[in-house]
Image: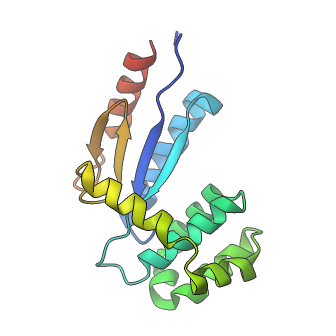
Amino acid sequence: MIDAPLPRLELWCELQCPDCRTALDDVRALRERYGDALTVELRHFPLEKHKHAYAAAEAAAEAFEQGRGWEYVEAVLARLEDVEQGGPQVLVEIAAAVGLDAEEVDTALIDGRNMLVVDADVAEGKAIGVTGTPTYVIAGQRLDGGQSQEGLRERIIELIEKSAG
């Protein structure tokens, strides 16, 4: 039985990363296990090797502002190949498909209103040693899923229950 509040789980993610798409399975399983008691926060960590990752992070920040961030993140990760080929235009199409104000997402990509959000996440990620994605931070521990995600869900559960229990 968990008596204390659960620690926040940060997912350092890049929205053109196939491993981040796979990491969503762990996030879904953790949400199913802990429900609303677990706060999962997406942190942006676009990698230079992916051409549209920074734009995707900016669009996701706008999606969170519009209240549908996780839905948008999941939709973008489900269409990695389309985003790679079509870039910002596909990001705006995905926004419309999930019910966002797509025109506002397009404008946000043009005016750069979310650049500071993304830049702040990248700077903080680098400061705490994030080098790739997905990376989790839970209960003061950084867990790197960029090499292998094997056993990470179990380790996250262990850390949650140890810190809350």
Q: Nearer the viewer, residue 28 or 161?
A: 161
Q: Quadrant of residue 64?
A: bottom right
Residue in the picture at 52% in, 9% down: 1
**Left-right relation of 137 to 58:** left
**Residue 40: x, y in percent?**
52, 42
Judge whether 152 appears above or below 119 on screen: above
Pick the front one: 19 or 131: 131
Question: Residue at (44%, 84%) from the top-left corner?
Answer: 84
Task: Kindly identify the residue that appears in the image at 51 percent across and 74 percent down.
Answer: 56
Q: Compared with residue 113, is residue 86 higher up or lower down, i.e. above or below?
A: below
How many labels sit on residues?
0
Residue 14: quadrant of the picture: bottom left
User: Residue 117 at x, y = what percent?
Assistant: 49, 63
Q: Which residue: 50% across, 44% down?
A: 27
Question: Is residue 66 left or right of 128 when viewed as pictured?
Answer: right
Q: Nearer the viewer, residue 50 or 54?
A: 54
Residue 124: give x, y in percent of width and height: 34, 54
- Residue 25 shows in the view: yes
Quadrant placement of the C terminus: top left
Q: Is residue 91 left or right of residue 19?
A: right
The colour scheme is rainbow
Q: Position of residue 2 (x, y in %)?
A: 52, 13
- The image quadrant of residue 60 is bottom right
**Residue 24 drawn above or below residue 164:** below
